[in-house]
Image (tube, grey):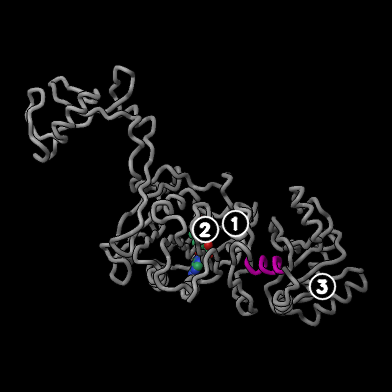
């Protein structure tokens, strides 16, 4: 098996991971949808709504679902590799037990439970606000990549702990010079005999440098200047990384989108330049963006074709790199049967994108126009001039999509109304198949109203895609 890198696989990670050879990944981060009964409403574009049902009825079903996927992830991880599982209160304890088992990493390879404060506050009635996520950090063996991260002290901390000021105005805190537990060399220093942390020679040198501070009882202590200390090693409670909020520049409007800073931290600590990073539930691609920024190679997997398209756009926009050249989106579904399984929103986006159109921003329930097809020159012009195609360019063909067989005459009539309302003379209707009545109605509308409706079936789109007639 050859390993392809800088790729996004579209599909269930259980099957896609089987294309990845054993023990070739340095770092895995996953953030799967949790075991909850909520419906997530994602806003991919300004007001475009998307629901994805949370499929897990209860924790056991969730664990059963994750188990074989985790096993595959474990298989592809290098012996020196690290693994992070991002979860919340719904299932974190059950997941920990699963990961602790010998079937996966084992208790001895558990390294940290990281608490990430992901919200400012949470109004949970009659209980404490649940505002943190949990990241379970494991390694595959007892030798793993580790780059210590130092967090600078805050001004508050320095003011609180660096309470003393030297003659020359430098702030310092005093540290004990007494060795703990009777260890360290024993000698007398200025009338006090005990075990010290430093040798007599070092004590003399510190004295010469003016780095010893004496208490009221004449006990020597070491002066530690704030300017000599860069900070402290990163601990397991992370409160300094803010969540992605809809109004932040980073936000793509996806409710479970994680901040790139969080992933940059994990990737920095647990991998090196050129290492291979994998996210098997990569959503809108935060991990791959962070990996790309930090010069790592990466693989992303997501079951949602819309998510895969969002990632491609995100990469092209942020790094000025091109899909099909600098990175690849693989396995976007192609068969009619696969497309039948799509949720309505996904199907609609697929059809409109496959035709080279642009999905409508506002989804008013079946307003009759799901997307618009613009002449290529207008798209290029709008990109160059930074214009919004919608509303500013009038030269478009409306697209209506129905995820059904036997699209009927009433559907065609509704589309005719929408076309007239928008003063269009040409339109495209996509469905799995069209009834005879619908086809008759299309001919009547052309004859009597002068409106041209092109009915395109899904298998025709696929055929044209394969022949390269659509982008
Ligand atoms: C919580 S989101 C991940 C968000 C991501 N960390 C980010 O910052 O954008 C979970 C993602 O897992 C995807 N997903 C769900 N089941 C999957 C599966 N079996 N294989 C691959 N992806 C899956 C969903 O489509 C969703 O995009």
Whether residue 10 can be seen here: yes
Indicate whether 246 appears above or below 427: above
Q: Which numbered disc flags the more N-terminal residue, 1 or 3?
A: 1
Farthest residue toward the bottom? 436
Mark linked to residue 454: 3
Q: What residue is shown with label 1? A: 315
Is 191 displayed left or right of 33 in the figure? left
The quarter holding residue 92 reads bottom left
Left or right: 266 as drawn, with respect to 160: right
Identify the element where label 2 is drawn: helix
- 339 inside magenta stretch: no
Residue 311 coordinates in the image, percent (x, y):
58, 59
Residue 247 coordinates in the image, percent (x, y): 58, 44
Mark closer to the chain start, 2 or 3: 2
Q: Quadrant of residue 157?
A: top left
In the rendered structure, which segment of residues is drawn in magenta?
346-354
Whether tag 1 and tag 2 are in contact, CB under 8 A, the answer is yes
193 left or right, relative to 435: left
Give the Cα distance between marks 1 and 2. Answer: 8 Å
Picture residue at 70% right of the left edge, 71% below the top: 402
């Amino acid at each position: 098996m050859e390993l392809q890198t800088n790729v996004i696989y579209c599909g269930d990670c259980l099957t896609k991971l089987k294309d990845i050879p054993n023990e070739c990944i340095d770092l895995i981060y996953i953030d799967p949808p949790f075991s909850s009964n909520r419906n997530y409403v994602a806003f991919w574009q300004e007001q475009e709504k998307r629901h994805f049902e949370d499929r897990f009825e209860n924790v056991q079903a969730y664990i059963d679902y994750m188990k074989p996927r985790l096993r595959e992830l474990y298989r592809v991880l290098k012996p020196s590799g690290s693994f992070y599982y991002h979860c919340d209160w719904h299932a974190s304890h059950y997941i920990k037990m699963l990961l602790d088992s010998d079937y996966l990493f084992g208790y001895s390879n558990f390294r940290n439970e990281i608490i990430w404060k992901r919200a400012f506050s949470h109004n949970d009635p009659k209980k404490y606000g649940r505002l943190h996520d949990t990241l379970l950090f494991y390694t595959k063996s007892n030798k793993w990549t580790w780059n210590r991260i130092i967090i600078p002290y805050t001004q508050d901390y320095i003011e609180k702990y660096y309470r003393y000021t030297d003659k020359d105005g430098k702030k310092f805190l005093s540290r004990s010079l007494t060795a703990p537990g009777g260890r360290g060399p024993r000698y007398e220093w200025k009338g006090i005999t005990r075990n010290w942390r430093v040798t007599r020679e070092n004590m003399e040198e510190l004295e010469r440098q003016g780095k010893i501070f004496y208490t009221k009882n004449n006990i020597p202590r070491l002066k530690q200047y704030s300017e000599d200390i860069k900070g402290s090693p990163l601990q397991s409670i992370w409160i300094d990384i803010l969540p992605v909020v809809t109004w932040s520049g980073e936000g793509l409007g996806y409710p479970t989108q994680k901040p790139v800073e969080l992933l940059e931290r994990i990737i920095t600590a647990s991998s090196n330049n050129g290492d291979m990073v994998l996210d098997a539930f990569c959503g809108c691609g935060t991990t791959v963006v962070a990996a790309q920024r930090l010069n790592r190679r990466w693989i992303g997997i997501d079951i949602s074709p819309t998510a895969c398209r969002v990632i491609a756009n995100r990469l092209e926009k942020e790094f000025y790199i091109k899909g099909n050249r600098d990175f690849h989106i693989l396995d976007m579904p192609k068969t009619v049967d696969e497309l039948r399984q799509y949720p309505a929103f996904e199907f609609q986006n697929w059809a409109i994108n496959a035709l080279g159109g642009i999905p409508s921003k506002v989804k008013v329930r079946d307003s009759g126009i799901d997307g618009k097809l613009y002449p290529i020159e207008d798209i290029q012009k709008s990109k160059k001039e930074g214009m919004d195609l919608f509303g500013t360019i009038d030269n478009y063909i409306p697209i209506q999509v129905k995820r059904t067989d036997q699209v009927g005459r009433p559907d065609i009539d509704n589309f005719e109304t929408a076309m007239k309302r928008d003063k269009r003379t040409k339109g495209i209707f996509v469905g799995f198949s069209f009834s005879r009545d619908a086809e008759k109605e299309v001919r009547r509308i052309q004859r009597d109203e002068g409106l041209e409706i092109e009915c395109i079936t899904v298998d025709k789109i696929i055929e044209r895609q394969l022949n390269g007639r659509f982008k």
